[in-house]
Image (tube, rainbow, N blue to C red):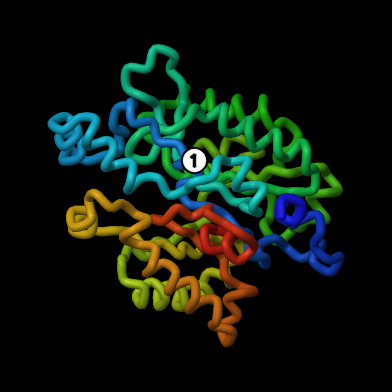
Amino acid sequence: MASSQGKSELKFADWMATLPDSIHSIPLTNLAIPGSHDSFSFYIDEASPVGPEQPETVQNFVSVFGTVAKKLMRKWLATQTMNFTGQLGAGIRYFDLRISTKPRDPDNELYFAHGLFSAKVNEGLEEINAFLTDHHKEVVFLDFNHFYGMQKYHHEKLVQMLKDIYGNKMCPAIFAQEVSLKYLWEKDYQVLVFYHSPVALEVPFLWPGQMMPAPWANTTDPEKLIQFLQASITERRKKGSFFISQVVLTPKASTVVKGVASGLRETITERQNFVLYTLGKDEDRGWTRRLGKVSDHQTAGTNMEGPTGSLSASCAT
């Protein structure tokens, strides 16, 4: 059993390298790339302050109930169970990243954040880079799509961090249809960085955020989510850019109140699995070939046992 599991993990860790030759020259915009939602949320620091993006009601809730409130919040904030290395080994190649400064932080560090704070950004990026160094034909998409409490010098710090960690591994922004595995391998590129800020226009290796759009259904209803995805995928495919189709069920405030002590896994997973099953069997629309992003917003998405599991937790181009 242990030997078999080892072979399986190796297979997913190098799945791009083992794709058939016929795929190598196809634009990556035409492939479904597994990814994860709130990719860093496998670690939530319950001792941290509440994130600056949280509404006043949440801030007040935490100020009154303290540690108990943060423990309850963690149940609704943690969408992943594997760290970056584990996700990469399971086949994940797209990472949804949200960056924040931390109030009263003496070191003025940058952190991943989702309601509460996660790890330092440089630690996560270095973990991903270590994997890429060992798997030189694998390519990742880093999508920096939310920034909280960041001034110009914070963006400059993050850009320099990317340079220091990834260097020549980063692919400069070009016409999306030109990017294939063959193109990237020939130039030793392994990282595409999407940056949802005007800063992207000033830095050659930052791809503007509009080249990775991510429409959000914002619903807890599986049927509405399926309709949203089916209506949008064909239209977005015509634009010739990367895109994200979020298989994301987002709890309403009433959902959280009713299941406040339960958390995402117990409240949303069943509905989420129904969506994935429905899309997986919808061969008429070619979802297994064309689905742009499958993202498990509110379940512990990276509990994976194989390629189907990795897609069920993923967001992909």
Quadrant location, the N terminus:
bottom right
Query: Which element type, helix, strand or loop, lies under badge 1?
Result: loop
Residue at horizontal 53 percent and vertical 42 percent from the top: 195
Marks counted in the figure total: 1
User: Is residue 174 or residue 51 the one in the foreground?
Assistant: 51
Compared to residue 25, the image places residue 132 above or below, namely above
Residue 230 appears in the rendering: yes
Q: Are there few (<14), some (14-19), or many (20+) residues within 10 Å of tag 1?
A: many
User: Residue 289, how many percent across, how many down?
Assistant: 64, 74
Judge by depth and name the residue closer to the eye, 215 or 272. Answer: 272
- The residue at the point 73 percent across, 44 percent down is 190
Q: Position of residue 276 (x, y in %)?
A: 49, 71
Q: Residue at x 55, y 47 (%)?
A: 95
Query: Which image quadrant for residue 268?
Result: bottom left
Note whether 184 is above or below 20 in the view shown: above
Up the image or down, 111 lies above or below 34; here it is: above
Instruction: Residue at the far top: name it.
Output: 106
Q: Is residue 60 left or right of residue 226?
A: left
Residue linked to disc 1? 40
Q: Quadrant of residue 132?
A: top right
Q: In the image shown, does 225 or 144 lie closer to the viewer? A: 225
Tell me which amino acid carries mark 1: Phe
* Residue 251 horizontal side relative to residue 212, left or right: left
